[in-house]
Amino acid sequence: MSQQKDSNQDAELGEPAAEPVAESTPDPAPVLLAKPAPAPEPDAAAEPDAAAATSTARPADARRVVTLAAIALLAVAAVAAAWFGGTWIVGGLIQDRPRAQARDNALDAAQQAAINITSMNLADVDGSLSLARSSMTGELLDASTKNQDQIKKQVLDSNVNMTSKVVGGSLTELNSERDRAAALVVLEVTENGPGKPAAKLRYTWSVDVVLDDGVWKADQVQVVSDPVALGGEAGSQQPAAPGDTAPTTQPAQPGN
């Protein structure tokens, strides 16, 4: 029995050791290579929508361009209107200014002439008559100068002081090309003298003026209506402008 064990041991010692069995390892799982997803086929239903969006965008862009162009044109038109409008207004004002100045000067001269002709200071008759003539020209001045002695005698005989003021006036005609104008003047004249009651009278005269050496002066005076007593008693004779048939004659002084 020991021999059997020894033989068995010898057999075990003499035989080469069996190769170790390699441990089985599980085969790796097969790696699946990812394939790109196939591109979606164009959707026939989507194509019209894209085309519609494109066609909608284009008119919108076109409208935007048209709107911007319209705004630009309006801005240019506004600037042009402001420029030409301002130029027209300024030009009109510049052109009309001399005529407006002529209207004012002619009316002022007509009113001043009416005041000077209807004013009298008994303490200085010659000065009063000279002041009246300073507002006259043409035939009216010639008649006043020619008849100044007669006019002075009438003033002294009346023995009346007169003060005058304008209560209304308006230019009725202006011919700036011929330097002529006409005005309607309403006056209030106060008369008083020694031993005479004071009287206030309203006169309405038409006064024609002409430009004489750059100064507007009266060359015609006409009575428009009869004098109206405003208070007190009227003078012995109302002042009168030249008659209708002789408009360039020197008007009689009030109180003649």
Image: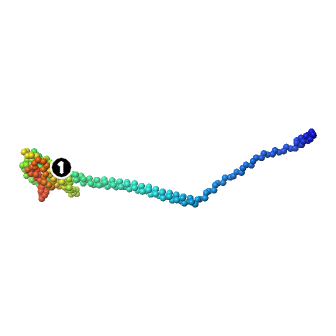
Position of residue 20 in the picture relative to residue 181 (left or right): right
> x and y percent of residue 49 in the render?
54, 58
Residue at position x 69%, y 52% from top? 32
Indicate the position of residue 80 as horizontal and vertical percent values: 37, 55
Dot 1 amino acid type = Val
- Residue at image location 24% in from the left, 54% down from the top: 99
Q: Nearer the viewer, residue 53 or 238?
A: 53
Residue positioned most to the top: 2
Does the image show residue 159? yes
Q: Quadrant of the N terminus?
A: top right
**SS at circle 1:** strand
- Pointer 1 residue: 167
Q: Residue at x 62, y 56 (%)?
A: 39
Vertical side of 25 occupied by 95: above or below? below
Q: Quadrant of residue 43?
A: bottom right
Give 100 or 21, whichever is nearer the viewer: 21
Label 1 CA crowd tier, 10 Å (few <14, some 14–19, many 20+): few
Depth order, front residue of 184/226: 226
- Please indicate, yes or no, whether residue 210 appears anywhere in the rendered image: no
- The percent coordinates of residue 242 (x first, y second) are 12, 55
Closer to us: 233 or 13: 233
Q: Residue at x 32, y 55 (%)?
A: 88
What colour scheme has been applied to the protein in the rendered image?
A: rainbow
Q: Number of numbered discs present? A: 1
x, y percent for residue 68: 44, 55
